Amino acid sequence: MDHTAISKFIQEGKGVLGIEFGSTRIKAVLIGEDHAPIASGDHTWENRLENGVWTYHLDDVWAGLRDAYQNLVKDVQAQYGVTLDALAGFGVSAMMHGYLPFGKDGSQLAEFRTWRNTMTGEAAAELTDLLGFNIPQRWSIAHLYQAMLNGEAHVKDIDHLTTLAGYIHWQLSGKKVLGVGEASGMFPIDSAKGDYDQRMVDLFDALAAVKGYSWKLRDILPQVLSAGEDAGVLTAEGAKLLDPTGTLKPGALMAPPEGDAGTGMAATNSVAARTGNVSAGTSVFAMVVLEKPLSKVYPEIDMVTTPTGKPVAMVHCNNCTSDINAWAGMLKGFLEASGHTISTNDLYTTIFNAALKGDKDCGGVINVAYFSGEPVTGLDEGRPMIVRTPDANMSFANFARSLVVGAMTSLKLGMDILARENVKIDTLLGHGGYFKTPVVGQKLLAAALKTPVSVMETAGEGGPWGMALLAAYRVNKRDGESLEDYLNRAVFATAKGSSESPDYTDVTGIDAYTAQFVQALEAEKAAVANIK
């Protein structure tokens, strides 16, 4: 679309908006008729550790949402000289999982407990045994059951339990619904029915009844919807919440709210069997759409779904780029103290490019980048640490490589399980900040996972663009057109990107590094136990 066509498109209220709440950034992306981004806005925020709980305040949710949207409005005005006052479609996404309980009057009953918390080990283990299905600690049902085990008084008063995306959608549309992919991070899904697994619902209800709770699980969980289904419209009240100036008109068709896993699948066209994607930022997760179920339950593997309900094996790691960010900040401070300046973008590019020049096994430098607990490796807390042998080659290139490779090593440990299960992957696409420096992230990840990794030109857009695509599907899909067919026809038919295949020397080097990383986990456990 040219500049004039985009201006007219926006003025006619045909734009489609996707907003995603990431761990450190809230980003809004507006797409045009060809599904390419035409404007964006964002807001930086951070989680808080309060009383041992990783959380965000809901006041910060709304302040951040409005700021990101207003920055989008300013971008539209600056680029096209028009006012954004109407939308054809709109979708909200956020970090999956977590715990947001509300009472009958809509009051928040407990602090928002995010995916980052590793406080539900007892509940997760008991539910995994009861349901015969892996229930990770960050899942909403694990948080609910842990609150029951803890005897928390608010549990009896729960009228609605949802996720961050579900909460925002509810306030904007009045609908207590979730996309099936997001719902699959609350409670197990029956892919054949695209709804909560009824056998498991019955088992949990029986458990809750024994403990004296009168509510039923389906009474408090959001309704499950598949991509493209009717999730309501932006109400007048919702439009005012998003845009307090009153400029934005209500009526935009709302897509079912999805999690960052589902939007990542949409953004990388990874919704068909034997496709997969890796979303890498503050956390990292890989999603592989399965042809058949795994042979058994693995505590390291989550079973979730695509936005249309297909079964997906998910390896989720709480820690990825936070340690790279921390070291980048330190290095920038060193340069400034020595009288030099460098842009943040150039700093990251320097670190990533240096990683390709290091020894294949990082020269004995091992980075355990755990800011928080890491269930894949059995850690309830994290202590970021660099470990090296006395004879390690502590060059800048090896240090940089240990940061970049170390950010992905926990993911590799989980993905190796799928390899042993003989799970077939035809395409694996990367997106998120880890892949912004060309070649480096995808080359090293390809070696770690022993499979080609592709990155599209749109990789930097990530989740908010994926949410906009799901909203566009809600608005524009043809009768009977599947999400896979829509993405192939309307979005990715002419997509451009690059692919990196595994290099044998990188493969053997990263395998050797991984063996040392596993050994270093004993030191990590000792640090958690002794450094408070």
Image (cartoon, helix red, strand yellow):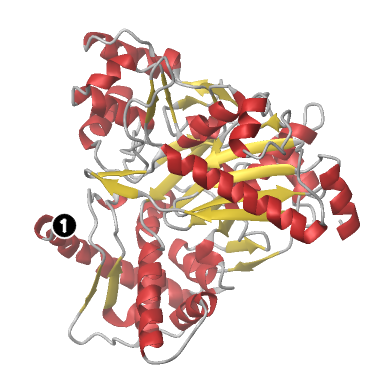
Relative to the observer, which residue lies in front, 13 or 422? 13
Helix, strand or loop status at disc 1:
helix
**Where, by quadrant of the figure, is residue 509 drawn?**
bottom left
Side of 467 where 387 appears, left or right:
left
The total of numbered circles placed on residues is 1
Relative to the observer, which residue lies in front, 501 or 353? 353
Residue 375 visible in this rendered orientation of the protein: no
**Considering the image in quadrants, where does the C terminus appear?**
bottom left
Side of 237 where 218 appears, left or right:
left
Q: Mark 1 points at which residue?
A: 528
Q: Residue at x 69, y 43 (%)?
A: 17
Amino acid, disc 1 = Val
| Residue placed furthest toward the front | 245
Q: Where residue 349 sits: x, y (%)?
A: 52, 78
Q: Where residue 433 sits: x, y (%)?
A: 52, 63
Q: Residue at x 60, y 44 (%)?
A: 19
Side of 516 where 409 appears, left or right:
right
Relative to the observer, which residue lies in front, 235 or 402? 235
**Where, by quadrant of the figure, is residue 364 drawn?**
bottom left
Q: Where residue 448 sits: x, y (%)?
A: 43, 65
Relative to the observer, which residue lies in front, 288 or 479? 479
Q: Which residue is drawn at 24% across and 49% down?
A: 378
Q: Residue at x 41, y 92 (%)?
A: 339
Up/down of 334 relative to 73, above or below:
below
Residue 176 visible in this rendered orientation of the protein: yes
Up/down of 514 relative to 491, above or below:
below
**Considering the image in quadrants, where does the N terminus appear?**
bottom right
Up/down of 230 relative to 365, above or below:
above
